[in-house]
Image (cartoon, helix red, strand yellow):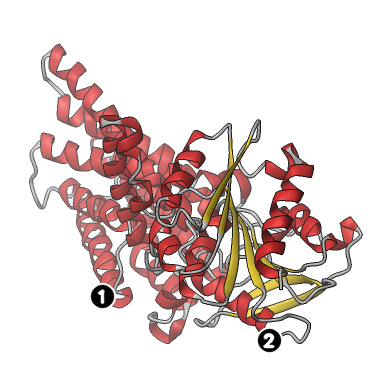
Amino acid sequence: MPISEDPATRRPALAAFAALNAAAAWAGVVGLTLGGIEFGDTLDARLPFESLVLAAVGLALIVAVPMTLLAWWAWTGNPRTLTLAFLVGIAVIGWIALQVIVLRAVSLFQPVYLAVGVWFIAESERVHLRPTTRGALVASAGALAVAVGVGLVPQFVENLPSAGALLCAVGILGGGAAVVAGARMMLHGRPVGTRVAGTVATLLGVVVATWLIAPGVAATNVPPSVITATPGDLGVEFESVTMSTVDGVELAGWYLTGTSDAAIVVAHGAGSTRSDALEQAAVLNRNGFGVLLVDARGHGDSDGTAMDFGWYGDADLIAAIDHLAERTDVDPDRIGLLGLSMGGEETIGVAAADTRVRAVVAEGATARTAQDKAWLSDAYGWRGWLQEQVEKVQFGITDLLTDASPPTTLRSAVGDAVGTPFLLITASAVADEGDAAEYLRTAAPERVTVWTVEGASHTGGLDTSPVEWEERVVSFLDEHLRSS
């Protein structure tokens, strides 16, 4: 259709907003089709025929194609633009409702696109909203989009090109534009003082939304991580192994044969792989321990959906312990764990779930639930209390975005792991690590040892004090795994 010569019939703002959302929808279609977007094993199983491709077709037909057509009609001045805008708004709302019904789950994208659907209906002039109300809807949707976009920044930085990276750009740029447009609608014609106060309040709202929402989005939308080195690069012989979790996820690992029948599972940190724990594993192995390095689900060569707060840790590490217990060269009564950062939190947690764990070394462990930060108010007063409330909201939002269940608190795990000793290694450069470790020690002072490595950064104990790290860690594991 040729572009209308009558500027009054063209709607460039509507065209731009529709085009932006069409781009996001098409990114979703591509991501679902090529496997760049997954809902997780549980939600995937709830799709019709368990087919992501079928979901992509539905997204294309119900949202992407109509949205693309609306963008073109609004730009060219088609007289049926407003009717299509109304239908697109209904389609978007219907698509969100269908998601909730079929997947039986909610996400932060849903309220964003509910607001988008309402905005299109309002623009159709079939339903009349006051400018203030319309502006508030647009600004709120924009703030949520910015927050989601910020949470997807790791996708943009580490995973170009990808659907996640495109959604990051669309969220930040498009959401920012929507915030500006919404604020202008709300504040148009107001006194200067009101406009200034309204602008500040709007910006504050975007900051708060980002602060609360982005961490959960980042933790549940983890970029792919790749193996960068193997034990062979350190001159250590190894065996590639696989193991399956109780929920059917296949994990990849390396086993380094020891000279004793005691063995250690080594768990890496968030956003990394077993390659990043090779130095620690090599120290253990040269001291005679068998060592199993395993990629957490969704990391490295392991299948499944990554979750960087470690909420799948129990299932993943129990599978690793099962593997060791089944080996003929390992005594199932001499199994220990060593974890870094997220891996440290996972090792603490699984010690309460699996009685075969005889000793735990956790470096850089701080928190994986809001309750793990309960020490903040004691340490920082009202500021700590405020942060505790923020953490509750952040972890609550995270719970909505993943099919993993929130795990037991770390302090509870230490208390419940009756008889299991813990060595908690903290970095002097990260004050929270020391505070968190002391809080955990109160659960079982007789079984928890805390060592602070002077001058170390997060999980940098071995790099900073290699001789002392080896002496302390090996002595601790010797005492509890090889003393008899």
Q: Please tell me whether residue 4 is drawn above or below residue 270 in the rendered image.
A: above
Amino acid under label 1?
Ile
How dense is the environment of label 2, judged by Cα within 10 Å: few (below 14), some, or many (20 and up)? few
Amino acid under label 2?
Glu
Which comes before the other along the chain, label 1 or label 2? 1
How dense is the environment of label 1, judged by Cα within 10 Å: few (below 14), some, or many (20 and up)? few
Q: Please tell me whether residue 151 is drawn above or below residue 484 in the rendered image.
A: above
The residue wearing badge 1 is 101
Residue at x 39% of width, y 61% of height: 64
Q: Is residue 247 visible?
A: yes
Residue at x 56% of width, y 79% of height: 245
Tag 2 secondary structure: helix
Q: Please tell me whether residue 447 is drawn above or below residue 154 in the rendered image.
A: below
Measured in 3D between alpha carbons, the distance from the residue under mark 1 to the one under mark 2, in whole angstroms, is 42 Å
- Farthest right residue in view: 235
Q: Please tell me whether residue 88 is drawn above or below residue 166 in the rendered image.
A: below
- In this rendering, the count of numbered labels is 2
Residue at x 42% of width, y 39% of height: 172
Q: Residue 479 location in percent, x, y? A: 68, 63
Q: In screen coordinates, is 449 left or right of 479? A: left
Q: Residue 99 occupies which quadrant of the picture?
A: bottom left
The residue wearing badge 2 is 326
Q: Which numbered disc, 1 or 2, marks the residue closer to the eye?
A: 2
Q: Residue 74 location in percent, x, y? A: 31, 46
Q: Residue 77 location in percent, x, y? A: 30, 45
Q: In screen coordinates, is 71 left or right of 441? A: left
Q: Nearer the viewer, residue 360 or 208?
A: 360
Q: Nearer the viewer, residue 423 or 199?
A: 423
Q: Residue 373 location in percent, x, y? A: 37, 46
Tag 1 secondary structure: helix
